Image (cartoon, grey):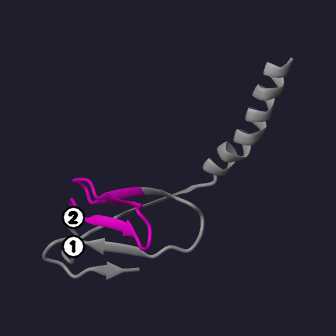
């Protein structure tokens, strides 16, 4: 019976964590140059976080984030850095 109570308490403690982990949104998009061509290997990061990724060979990216207001920082060597 004690083992069951410990397992039950552990389940109750971990359950809110699993619900919080599902509270995310996906931010995705494309990065293109002035000529409209997709730009691969562009760094797309979220300001003041460790979240970030690179664009693929078609200029596409996708990030999983907590809902809210975020600032994107887009950088590529040879181009101006953009904050949006």
Q: Could you tell whether 68 is left or right of 2 in the image? A: left
Left or right: 45 in relation to 14: left
Task: Check the image and report above or below for 20 versus 28.
Answer: above
Residue position marked by numbered label 2 in the rendering: 39
Q: Main secondary structure of the magenta part?
A: loop
Q: Position of residue 75 (x, y in %)?
A: 25, 72
Q: Is residue 59 magenta?
A: yes
Report the front residue among 56 and 69: 69
Secondary structure of the residue carrying numbered label 1: loop
As drawn, the residue found furthest toward the left would be 78
- Camera-side residue: 61 or 16? 16
Residue 69: x %, y % from top left: 56, 74
> In the rendered view, would you say 52 is above or below 79?
above
Q: Secondary structure at mark 2?
A: loop
Residue 46 disc label? none
Query: Start and end of the magenta stretch?
Result: 38-62
**Quadrant that contains the N terminus:** top right
Q: What x and y, as percent, mark residue 76?
A: 20, 71
**For residue 49, which quarter of the picture?**
bottom left
Q: Residue drawn 21% across and 64% down?
A: 39
Residue that appears at 21% across and 59% down: 40
What residue sits 60% from the left and 64% below the top?
67
Check the image and report above or below for 33 versus 66.
below
When the figure is inspected, residue 32 is found, relative to residue 24, above or below; the finding is below
Q: Is residue 19 magenta?
A: no
What's the mark number on residue 33? 1
In this rendering, position of residue 51 left or right of residue 25: left
- Residue 18, by quadrant, is top right
- Do the residues bearing badges 2 and 1 touch, measured as CB atoms within 8 Å? yes
């Amino acid at each position: 019976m004690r083992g069951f109570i410990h397992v039950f308490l552990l389940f109750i403690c971990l359950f809110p964590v699993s619900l919080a982990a599902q509270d995310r949104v996906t931010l995705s998009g494309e990065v293109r140059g002035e000529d409209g061509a997709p730009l691969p290997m562009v760094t797309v990061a979220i300001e003041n976080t460790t979240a970030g990724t690179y664009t693929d060979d078609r200029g596409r990216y996708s990030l999983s984030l907590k809902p809210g207001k975020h600032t994107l920082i887009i950088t590529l060597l040879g181009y101006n850095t953009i904050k949006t």
